[in-house]
Amino acid sequence: MSPVFRTIALIGKYKSPEVAESLLTLADFLRGRGIEVLVEEETAALAGAGGFPVVAYAGIGARADLAIVLGGAGSMLAAARRLAESDVPLVGVNQGRLGFMTDLARGDMLAGVGQLLEGRFSSEQRFLLEAAVSRGAQEVFRTRALNDVVVNKGDLGRMIEFAVAIDGEFLYNQRSDGLIVATPTGSTAYALSANGPILHPAVPGIALVPLCPHALSNRPITIGDDRRIEIHLHAPHQARVHADGQEKFDLEPGDRVAIARSPRSIRFLHPPGYSYFAMLREKLHWSETPRQR
């Protein structure tokens, strides 16, 4: 049986012997199956993947049928944002900790990838957010996020004050450490740590989760994913906006952050037997047998 994917890109961001070893093992496995293997340029520099074509993300988007990411959530987030312009699907091999987006365990990597090559997988589309910062009449920053866009106090040791509007309608003024705007994908990340709701990936919603609000009545709220959120930073406060915890921009008093669903999305491929609820049970240790005293 000929493989479903003819050209596969490998991406790994952590500089560790384990990732390098896994990447080279996988590259040899794929080449043995007659598949063209591309290695992302920063990954190649870290892993020493000589003997394989080295390409930038633009090359992956143009040439690859699939990208396999070896690492943790941070690696998947970075790859998703960079490949959102293309339709290259992603598969994750967990080399990190919880790994909500990385389905394949390191020990099962070759067997899992073998199933993918045979066409035994399910496909799932995940949407991204787009955030733009306006300073007066000028746009000064724009970015995308798969997990979340966060406005927080940055390096300040005090709370910030800001107003939030939805589709131009005033929602509330808030005094807090900040606000997390999360996708369903990001609802199990930073937003979960701030007592936000878990959103199933099929839910067309965006969660707004306050960070340490200075009012007991401030609670997380979920809105439709077709809504536009605007955060207006009140003077004299300064703050910072983050995208997936990887990109950041310093805000000045009066800046406005507009956040909406991106027209771009990313496609995840899951191995046979994948279940979102089973993943939650495993990662969050739900339904564990009580310890005997």
Image: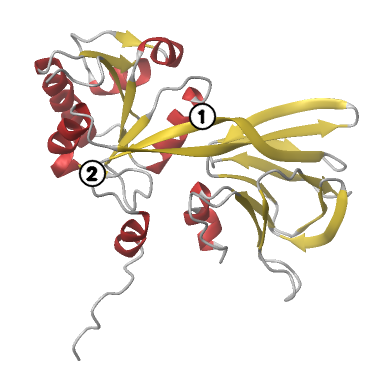
> Is the residue 126 above or below the residue 63 in the image?
below
Q: Residue 272 carries which label?
A: 2
| Quadrant of the drawing holding the N terminus | top left
**How dense is the environment of label 1, judged by Cα within 10 Å: few (below 14), some, or many (20 and up)?**
many
Residue where numbered disc 1 is placed: 81
Q: Where does residue 98 sit, x and y in percent of width and height?
A: 34, 53
> Is the residue 151 above or below the residue 140 in the image?
below
Q: Which of 289 and 120 is in front in this view?
A: 120
Q: Residue at (69%, 59%) from the top-left corner?
A: 177
Q: Is mark 1 on a helix, strand or loop?
A: helix
In the rendered structure, which amino acid carries the disc numbered 1? Arg
Q: Where does residue 193 sit, x and y in percent of width and height?
A: 51, 62
Residue 134 in the figure: left or right of residue 208? right
Q: Which mark is residue 235?
A: none
Q: Earlier in the sequence, mark 1 or mark 2?
A: 1
Q: Where does residue 181 sit, x and y in percent of width and height?
A: 64, 50
Q: Where does residue 171 sit, x and y in percent of width and height?
A: 83, 58
The answer to whether residue 154 of the structure is visible from this angle is no
Q: Residue at (48%, 49%) from the top-left corner?
A: 201
In the rendered structure, which amino acid carries the disc numbered 2? Pro
| Quadrant of the drawing holding the C terminus | bottom left
**How dense is the environment of label 2, judged by Cα within 10 Å: few (below 14), some, or many (20 and up)?**
few
> Is the residue 140 above or below the residue 74 in the image?
above
Task: Measure how far apart labels 1 and 2 are at the Cα level.
Answer: 26 Å
Residue 236 in the figure: left or right of residue 8? right
Toward which corner of the image does residue 286 lie, by quadrant?
bottom left
Residue 158 in the figure: left or right of residue 96? right
Residue 121 in the figure: left or right of residue 255? left
> Is the residue 73 above or below the residue 81 in the image?
below
